[in-house]
Image (cartoon, rainbow, N blue to C red):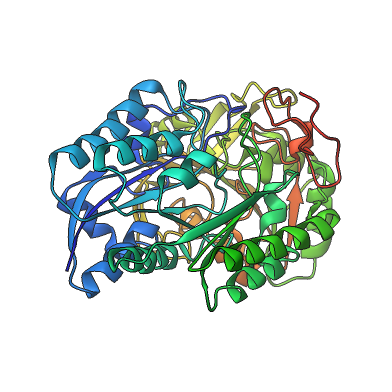
């Protein structure tokens, strides 16, 4: 039986996004669990996040857990210096002032702070300095981690998700625990890693589709014999710093075996580079195709409004997809969640059945985005309290604040007072919209929605409307990438 210090600090940073992550954003969670401390962290055992899986696995083996803090915020631009130093400082201070045998950290792997390019590498370096060279440190990472040399150097083991949508988060926490148990038993793992020379659009990373599905099948198959852990992080291709991009790594009892596994996956990725490209539709083409497909269908056609995904740095308030629905006369359509607290409050003040003039959304400052000005009917209101019942974040309670369903023409709009990626059908239901009954659904999401929406979808389309999260990394104004990395599969190399 060992005592394990555990903490979580999660943020996916889009350095091109408009809004920064403050300490208050982490307090609210914004699609993650609320910030929690001490024994309240242990309540996350029932939530599908890595910490939940780690806690269950460690408790089942009788270990003593020393929880410090768990904090996550919706993807955005840089984490403020204040937020990083307060949360990282709390974790490191606990490590310096308590006695324990090992450390588990539930991290994302793509955090950039105002003053630190590599948030996780910096935190791991501080933890290593605090606990010394012999204390086992294991961390779980998001599939979208931009894995750095500092992260690999200061952790004894890192393990990443293998699904996108991330339905295996708790399972990844359990795999992190299995690695930590090896280290606690005295095993010392050797690691190998290789960085790929091209960026991948996030829509192309979906493990429900090829080539990602086949790549991850190979990752899992290589864990055998002397190779005890293999991970592949395609990266988060919207962080402008030199170590942005995909990385493959492995741990083993024999260095040659770990290197061989990494090399095999590396050459597979190089050979299949062209397959990782992604086609996109314009807003009008996406809506017209959805109208055609849904005309005689019994299930909704789902469109991903991928460039305004709040799970990748968008603010969920761009309006071009709503304009396209109305412009093309779409019927039986719904869109959500739209983050506009002022509009939600106005609807609550006006009351059910009221008609009100609003200038909805359009605050992104992205070229091509503009508000939707019009008369809306208030058709549903709620307090925004819900539970996630889909595969992503299953079991988590969420508080969105005042929520309203507005109607314009034959389009329903779910408007929220908090940002949340549309990854669970209950995010429509909390606004009084039954997603299964709609002809067309437009989701502010890139891939995560597929876990809960693909079972009800007639078809899924991906639209490229104006938004802060540029879907094709080749379109971003890079300044600090590593020279020579291709900014899309088969694309131009960054010259520096």
Above or below residue 68? Residue 397 is below
Residue under the image location 85 percent in, 40 percent down: 491
Residue at the extreme bottom? 225
Res 332 seen here: no
Above or below residue 217? Residue 266 is above
Residue under the image location 49 percent in, 59 percent down: 190
- Residue 380: give x, y in percent of width and height: 45, 48
Which quadrant of the figure has residue 361?
Answer: top right
Above or below residue 9? Residue 302 is below
- Residue 15: give x, y in percent of width and height: 58, 28
Front in this rendered view, residue 188 or 76: 188
Which quadrant of the figure has residue 175?
Answer: bottom left
- Horizontal side of 272 relative to 247 (left or right) equals right
- Horizontal side of 259 relative to 70 (left or right) equals right
The quadrant of the image that shows the N terminus is bottom left
- Horizontal side of 128 relative to 323 (left or right) equals left
Res 5 seen here: yes
Front in this rendered view, residue 180 or 334: 180
Which quadrant of the figure has residue 309?
Answer: top right
Residue under the image location 13 percent in, 39 percent down: 97
Residue under the image location 75 percent in, 44 percent down: 197
- Residue 300: give x, y in percent of width and height: 68, 64
Front in this rendered view, residue 249 or 306: 249
Q: How many marks?
A: 0
- Residue 437: give x, y in percent of width and height: 60, 65
The quadrant of the image that shows the C terminus is top right
């Amino acid at each position: 039986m060992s005592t394990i210090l555990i903490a979580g600090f999660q943020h996916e940073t889009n350095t091109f996004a408009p809004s920064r992550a403050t300490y208050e954003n982490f307090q609210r969670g914004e699609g993650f669990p609320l910030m929690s401390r001490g024994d309240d962290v242990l309540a996350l055992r029932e939530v599908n996040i890595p910490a939940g899986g780690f806690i269950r696995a460690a408790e089942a083996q009788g270990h003593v857990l020393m929880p410090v803090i768990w904090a996550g915020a919706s993807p955005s631009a840089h984490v403020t210096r204040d937020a990083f130093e307060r949360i990282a400082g709390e974790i490191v201070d606990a490590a310096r002032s308590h006695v324990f045998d090992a450390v588990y950290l539930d991290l994302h792997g793509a955090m950039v702070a105002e003053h630190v390019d590599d948030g996780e590498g910096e935190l791991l370096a501080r933890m290593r300095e605090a606990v010394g060279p012999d204390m086992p440190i294991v961390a779980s990472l998001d599939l979208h981690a931009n894995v750095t040399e500092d992260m690999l150097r200061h952790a004894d083991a890192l393990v990443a998700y293998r699904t996108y949508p991330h339905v295996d988060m708790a399972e990844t926490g359990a795999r992190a625990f299995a690695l930590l148990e090896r280290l606690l038993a005295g095993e010392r793992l050797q690691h190998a890693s290789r960085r790929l020379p091209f960026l991948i659009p996030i829509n192309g990373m979906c493990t429900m589709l090829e080539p990602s599905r086949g790549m991850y099948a190979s990752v899992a198959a290589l864990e055998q014999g002397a190779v005890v852990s293999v991970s592949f992080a395609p990266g988060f291709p919207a962080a402008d710093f030199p170590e942005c991009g995909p990385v493959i790594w492995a741990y083993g009892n024999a260095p040659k075996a770990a290197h061989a596994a990494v090399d095999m996956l590396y050459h597979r990725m190089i050979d299949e580079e062209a397959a990782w490209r992604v086609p996109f539709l314009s807003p009008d083409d996406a809506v017209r195709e959805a109208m055609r497909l849904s005309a005689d269908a019994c299930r909704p056609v789902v469109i991903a409004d991928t460039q305004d995904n709040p799970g990748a740095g968008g603010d969920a308030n761009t309006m071009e997809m709503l304009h396209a629905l109305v412009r093309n006369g779409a019927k039986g359509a719904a869109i959500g969640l739209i983050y506009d607290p002022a509009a939600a409050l106005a609807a609550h003040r006006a009351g059910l059945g009221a008609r009100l003039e609003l200038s909805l959304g359009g605050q992104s400052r992205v070229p091509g985005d503009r508000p939707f000005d019009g008369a809306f009917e208030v058709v549903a209101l709620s307090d925004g309290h819900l539970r996630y019942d889909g595969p992503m974040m299953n079991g988590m309670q969420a508080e969105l604040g005042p929520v309203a369903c507005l109607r314009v023409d034959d389009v329903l709009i779910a408007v929220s007072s908090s940002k949340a990626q549309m990854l669970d059908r209950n995010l429509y239901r909390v606004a009084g919209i039954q997603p299964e009954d709609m002809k067309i659904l437009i989701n502010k999401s890139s891939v995560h929605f597929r876990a809960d929406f693909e079972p009800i979808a007639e078809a899924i389309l991906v639209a490229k409307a104006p938004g802060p999260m540029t879907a094709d990394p080749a379109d971003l104004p890079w300044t600090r990438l590593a020279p020579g990395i291709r900014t899309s599969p088969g694309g131009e190399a960054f010259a520096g």
